[in-house]
Image: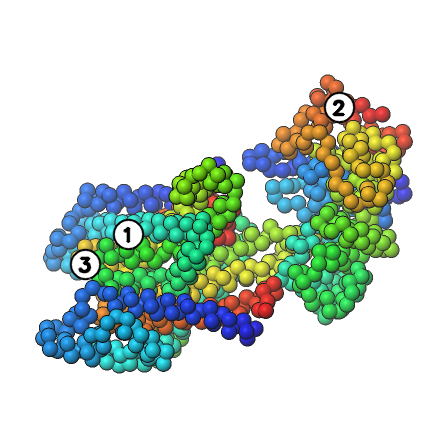
Amino acid sequence: MTGAPLIEVRDLRIDLDYGSRRVAAAEGVSFRIDRGETFGLVGESGCGKSITALALIGLLRPPLSIGGGVIRFEGQEVQHLSAARQRELRGNRIAMIFQEPMTALNPVSPVGRQIAEMFVLHKGKGWREANKLAVEALASVRVPAPERRVHDYPHQLSGGMRQRVMIAIALACGPDLLIADEPTTALDVTVQAEIIELMRNLCAERGTAILMISHDLGLVANVCRRVAVMYAGRIVEERGSADIFRAPSHPYTQGLVASLPRLGSRAALGRSRLKEIAGVVPAITNFPDGCRFNPRCAQATEICRTIVPETDRLDAGGLVRCHHHA
Amino acid sequence: MKLRANLVIGGALFALAILVGLLAPWLAHTDPVMDANLMNAEEPPSWTWWFGTDDQGRDIYSRVVYGAQVSLTVGIVSQLINSVIGVALGLSAGYFGGWWDDVVNALTNLMLAIPSLIFALAIMAVLGPGLTSLLIALGLTNWSFTCRIARASALSLRSQGYVQAATVLGYGDLRIMITQLLPNMLGPIIVIGTLGMGSAVLSEAALSFLGLGVRPPFPSWGSMLSEAREQITTAPWLSVFPGLAIFLTVLGLNLLGDGLRDILDPQSRSRRT
Amino acid sequence: MLSFLFRRLLQTIPTVLAVVALVFVLFSVAPGSIVSSMSDDSDPQVELRMKQQLGLDQPVYARFGAYIAKLATGDFGTSFRTREPVTTMIAKRIWPTLQLVFAAMALAVVIGVPLGFVAALKPGGIVDTLAMVVAVSGLSIAKFWLGLVLMYFFALKLGWLPSFGYGDGGLKYLILPAVTLGVSPMALFARTTRAAVLEIMTADFVRTARSKGMSETRVVKWHVMRNALVIILTTVGLQFGALMGQAVVVEKLFSWPGIGSLLVDSVLQRDIPAVQGSILVVVLAFLAINLLIDLLYGVIDPRIRYA
């Protein structure tokens, strides 16, 4: 552990208002990311990884809200900052790219303008200068002929090009943290690798930390130094990327790893989707008592059905939330 | 489900209007046509004459009460005609496709090109004033929106499994359309119909105001306003109550339509008429 | 762009022809002789001569052919009443109607659209509730009643504005009719805008905009507005037709010398050529305006290209 972390999440709970009820869509979520580090958050859809990311950048909207816990960015509690101070962080220090490059860009605004906005918002530039910087930003994500491309509208670009534009927007102000929520899921396989490489290289050059969110353990482990696995709103295991493949500790992680084609093989790098483990993820409104994985777990015993497991520190390094972990 | 304010208020206003229309003979103080008495001409509202009297001494309150009959009959019946035409054309066009679809599309575009009030006016000009003419004129000129919704809905439903299953089972086209397709598009159709009734009430009033509606002396809110205009300086109360009656009735229908939309057609937030 | 315009013009021709046919058929099959309804003396000799004069003794299809041929040269026929060419009568009245309709439309857009935006910024808030109550009321009010009420207060009681007529064509004559006509489209635009904005606010690109650290005001100004305009424009285009229809009532109420009042007067006096001509001109104007709106789409929405 090297000094103060860049961002620290402790015991975060995210509430979902469901009719007249309020349920926790995620709870007990804790992790930290250091400067320039790469951290992955993995899980099936609905496990709470995306809303955790939205909570970090302050974009939860009703019916979702932060129900408890602390998010510290450079030691400051983000939730208690004024709306204006939060906006100064957002985009400028913490940036985000989204899954769907088709819909994540405004269809009726030229892409150059959508990049230039960042310089106007955070760097106090006028539009003229911001537009010039937008051309440079587009060049930095290796878009050919950027001085012409800035005038294009999103529908004139391919999916890969659009995601490059998203990266250009996200990295425009040189953020300290880039949150990438399934950045390549919607793209062709061949384009996926290019985009991942680009994102990783640019962030490494600039010392930008990455929080990568994906359902794809192989992809995340390839990009990130540490990985946390989420299941039904809780982090069940957090390990170094190599360790998680070598000796997964939580039965759910074991299932995930087993469902990958071959550890570390090329096929695992950003290609295969997670295969389903027997059973389905429980609905948010219907989480089981005790360990939430117990209905699908072969090793489950009576204690798993009644008592929520605590997060334990593993001797080999890393954290796990299981009554029966090795 | 939360009880929506617009549903309750709208439903109450509409129910009130219907009750007034049905109970007009008991609610009215005088006969709306016969009880003219120049001795009472142009009385302002009072305990005797709740809404005042007109230049012929007729009781405005009684005339407004009877006027509900015309407005609501025209509003409800003409919109029913529109809904039936719109659903029949749109449903069959979407279901059969082909040349029939093209014909219906052309008809719909034609209807959209002629402002509906002007179309209704032209029909009234041909048929002459009267209740039946009103029902026809307004019933034939406002179905294009219903038709479009029905067509779009039939198109999307046609390809769905259960409709195809019905075809395989040897159900006739008509039976499939009525038993399989119609129930699934009823929500938006009812919403459009409710809002359409409101605009039919307004159109009836407009046509009557122009002298092309119900023949005087039988009271209609529109024709009462037309007469009231002449006396706006001497007897402004003549203008107040029929206009208020139209407003409250149409407001009721619009609120009811909005409320029903929230329940029956929740995904169409931007599809406003 | 030019080829698009040309193609769109071509597309409107069948519609125009259909309207012409409809208007013609409607009045050719009108029950009762038109001529007998207009002359009090029932001298058969006179009636026959008039029928010949007006070409009414010909079979229907021949009259339709002749009608089309004359229309093509811009001749709408001769008024039964005034014996004036209908084209001249309409020409005199088209400008006041356009003035009225555009003024009402401008008013409706300038007030209705911002109202919808403001309402959508805090859905369920006081401003929203108030705006939507006003809007649903505006949609529910009978135009001529609103006109009467406005006339009573602003013209008769306060004496600020003339109560009716075109006067010298000055602005003060236009205000009351335009407000009367503009209230319901204003209400409609407020509702449409609000619904459009609320829908767009849930779009992914709005989330992206927020992730950039934009204030909600900027999100709306930079990203929501233009997208909403595409939806609003559609409503505006359709509303032009409705306004031209409703202008009839407003023109009649305020004795405004437009096509609408010409139409009503002609209908009441069974002046068929004038009725046919007025309806056709209204439809043509409506189609022309919608053509312009289609061109505007391309300006607002880059996804539409006139290839």
**Picture residue at 48% right of the left edge, 49% below the top:** B155
The answer to which quarter of the image holds residue C283 is bottom left
Q: Amino acid at mark 1?
A: Val
Residue at 41% in and 57% down: B104
On the rendered image, what quadrant is the N terminus of chain C found in?
bottom right
Whether residue B150 can be seen here: no
Which chain does the numbered disc 3 sit on?
B
The mark nearer the N terminus, 1 or 3, is 1
- Within 10 angstroms of label 2, few (less than 14), some, or many (20 or more) residues? few
Q: Which mark is residue A298?
A: 2
Mark 1 — on which chain does it sit? B
Tell me the distance, in whole angstroms, between the alpha carbons under discs 1 and 3: 16 Å
Mark 1 or 2: in front is 2
Q: Mark 1 near mark 3, Cβ–Cβ under 8 Å?
A: no
Picture residue at 36% right of the left edge, 67% below the top = C19
In the rendered image, which quarter contains the C terminus of chain C?
A: bottom right
Instruction: Read off the residue under disc 3.
Output: B216
Note whether C307 is above or below A22 in the view shown.
below
Mark 1: which secondary structure? helix
Chain bearing tag 2 is: A
**Horizontal and vertical percent position of residue A181:** 73, 47
Amino acid at dot 2 = Ala
